[in-house]
Amino acid sequence: MSQRRFTSEVAEWVKGVGLRPTKQRVALARLLFNHGHRHVTAEQLHSEAKAAEIPVSLATIYNTLNQFTRAGLLREVVVEPGRSYFDTNTDDHHHFYFEDSGSLRDIPGDQVELGNLPEAPAGTSVDRVDVIIRVRENQGHNAGRTSTG
């Protein structure tokens, strides 16, 4: 598919979710969705935009990511206060969070079973449940062993 045709399709897609297909939104959507499913921070996307010579501020990146999330194009995954990833996979799924590298890996939704959820507070309903399983790399082959001798 030609770059021009792909850009036109992205513009229509952005317009289809109720957003104005500005040059910056379309360029950022191309960066986000041209690589399959992935998890990206605002800072990572800003670096990619700079490398692609797309003139955009970090504030505009944050605004666009939040607009795309509200429109249902992305899913925000908050791994700790002040650290969010934006996920291009909006299907039902959960995540492994690798604390050593700060990366995320998808877990298919059917691999996590939830039970006994508390009743939602009055006047609310559960929108979705996000499970983040935090993992660390094992420290070498002798982790957990004691030395004898």
Image: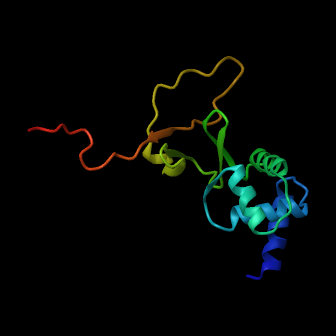
Query: Relative to 100, is 114 above or below?
Result: above
Q: Quadrant where the C terminus lies? A: top left
Query: Relative to 70, is 31 above or below?
Result: below
Q: Residue furthest left?
A: 149
> Front-most of 59 and 124?
59
Task: Please give the name of the residue rendered at 83% of the width and 79% of the height, measured from the top-left corner.
Answer: 4
Task: Please give the name of the residue rendered at 78% of the width and 63% of the height, measured from the top-left corner.
Answer: 50
Q: How many numbered markers are drawn?
A: 0
Task: Please give the name of the residue rendered at 81% of the width and 78% of the height, measured from the top-left corner.
Answer: 5
Q: Quadrant where the N terminus lies? A: bottom right
Percent x, y of residue 84: 65, 42
> Front-most of 140 and 40?
140
Percent x, y of residue 48: 72, 62
Query: Relative to 59, is 38 above or below?
Result: below
Would you say 52 lies left or right of 93 here? Answer: right
Task: Please give the name of the residue rendered at 54% of the width and 47% of the height, measured from the top-left corner.
Answer: 102
Would you say 39 lies left or right of 101 here? Answer: right
Q: Residue furthest top?
A: 122
Would you say 44 lies left or right of 145 here? Answer: right
Would you say 143 lies left or right of 148 here? Answer: right
